[in-house]
Amino acid sequence: MLSLLKTIRHAIASWWSEFTLQTKLLAVATMVVSLVMSGLTFWAVNTIQQDARMNDTRFGRDLGLLLAANVAPLVADNNLSEVAQFSQRFYSSTSSVRYMLYADETGEIFFGIPFWEAEVENSLTIKRRIQLPEDYPGDGEKPMVRQHTTPDGIVTDVFIPLIVNKKYLGVLAIGINPNQTAVISTNFTRDVTIAVFITIWVMVILAGVINALTITKPIKELLVGVKQIATGNFKQRIDLPLGGELGELILSFNEMGERLERYEEQNIEELTAEKAKLETLVSTIADGAVLIDNNMQVILVNPTARRIFGWENADVVGCNVLHHLPASVQMEITSPLYEMAAGECESAEFRIFINQPTPRTIRILLTTVLNVQRESIKGIAITVQDITREVELNDAKSQFISNVSHELRTPLFNIKTYIETLHDYGEDLALKERQEFLQTVNHETDRLTRLVNDVLDLSKLESGRNYSFDGVDLAQAIEQTLRTYQLNAKDKGVELLQEVAPNLPLVMGNYDLLVQVFGNLIGNALKFTKAGGKVAIRAYRLDFKPSHTQSAPVRIEISDTGIGIATEDQHSIFERFFRVENRVHTLEGTGLGLSIVRNIIDRHRSKVHLVSEVGIGTTFWFDLAAFEEKALPIQVEPIAEASKITTT
């Protein structure tokens, strides 16, 4: 039972919550009006009923007094038959009397209408006594009136004492029927009131249901639809078969939803296209790019940044960028990132060295991303530049300048010293001493000239100058080089050997540059080969072909039986100003010859290799592509960065 009541209460509460405030106020006002009207109606009915009771009471009292005056003498004479006849005539002539009872002074009924005493005794075999009210005075002269309710209505009971000559003979009890006209009027009024009350509430309930079905429900559906549209759900539709203005409103809402959905699809397509363009653009730039929001969550990262930070196999989008950065980077930019997110600064720049995933130097630029109005910060753009090569070039430039300064200072100091000595003490010096001083100055001048020439040659090779490549006859270039160094080799007691294969094809190259390569390599070989040693230059064609469309290349080797190059020096032998004599402390040089060789061979799209052993000798070798007769001469652009040298 309790669960049923709870269910009913919950249903009523739910039903009541469906109504709007206006509907609830209307229902409350209707209830108040109906209650007031019902109260007034019941008050009027009650007033009518009270008036009817008063009239019945007066009528019964007067009627009882009249009957008592007529029958009291007959009762005193014990003329009961006359009493019965009179009473019967009176009872039959009026419909207002319901019963008439005669009782003696002890209260025993001796006659009654509509039944006789004999009939009562025969049917009930008992004697009836009248039940007088407790406050009945007994032998009083005034009648007593009371009312009681029966199924047929309210009956007025009148008790009139029968007194003759001041002697109390008994009591006459008369029952007076209610006034039918008043009863009918009262019942009709009551029924009409109840009917009106019920009708009002039925109409209110029907109006509420109709309101809920035709107005409230569509409005609630519209409210839900508007909220869905506000949250971005443009697929929301309202399917209610209504007409009139409300139907037009629903139709307009659905049309609005369709238009917004189409606009959203177009915007999504445009945004997707723009995002794809942006991602493509960001992915193609050489610098690393990372975009984060104000909570340090990664929104976008390009492949360059992934490679620099080693994120190739990590899904960092949506994660805190500080959790995935190298420790050195995290330490530097954590505080500035939070300051930028708080709007305390707009940009920052850092130069950081990292060890992982590979050692490199990077430059990090932090820039805030503002909204269109430039009022609030939407995120932070992190630009990552790999400046390792730039740092190395700057270091190399500084080292180059330092080495050139050192190499220039030494001969200039010697020249200045000897010239000042000759100027100040020339007359005091012997002729032989002056000749030795002048010979030293000449030697240092030649050394200075060689250094300047080598620097100029290296500068030309590393500048933006273009070289024309054509077919080169290696035999001629080698012969020219050997003629240049033949006298020098003879003076040192070193044998120059030439092993050039017959019928060598022309090679693709620049004649002057190749002659310079041969001269530098043979000159170094002679310098580091002692008397009785040998220096050989070989040229022969290889047996294999790099591809089906290319001819077999030609290999050139320059070998000597000199002091050799230690293994720890072989990886640095082609660097600027690196000299083996610095280790062995024997001969002098600029330290630029092999660097020039490397640059020239790099321009010929080849690599210089070396094999060396200390005390046994050194062999340099490289390959040159064969010249195709049908191929036109080509212009070789300068290369931005020299290739690394492979040693075997």
Image (cartoon, helix red, strand yellow):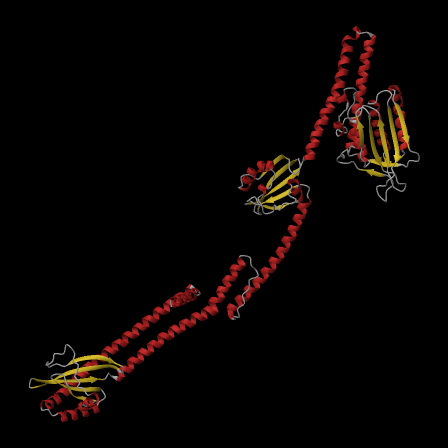
Q: Is residue 467 visible?
A: yes
Task: Check the picture and name the quadrant holding the N terminus.
Answer: bottom left
**As drawn, which residue projects farthest toward the left?**
165
Vertical relation: 465 (above or below) 107:
above
- Which quadrant holds residue 595? top right
Q: Residue furthest top?
A: 428
Direction from residue 455 to residue 65 in the image, left or right: left
State which quarter of the image contains the C terminus: top right
Q: Is residue 457 visible?
A: no
Q: Residue at x 65, y 53 (%)?
A: 273
User: Residue 153: where, in percent of width, then height?
Assistant: 26, 81
Is 321 displayed left or right of 86 in the figure? right
Is residue 300 or residue 84 the one in the foreground? 84
Q: Is residue 374 above or below residue 81?
A: above
Q: Position of residue 525 (x, y in %)?
A: 83, 25
Q: Quadrant of residue 580?
A: top right
User: Is residue 72 shown above or below 303?
Assistant: below
Front in this rendered view, residue 446 or 318 = 318
Residue occupying image coordinates x 73% and y 23%: 405
Residue at the right extreme of this rendering: 503
Q: Residue at x 83, y 22 (%)?
A: 527
Residue 568, percent from left and from top:
74, 27
Q: Is residue 232 left or right of residue 38?
A: right
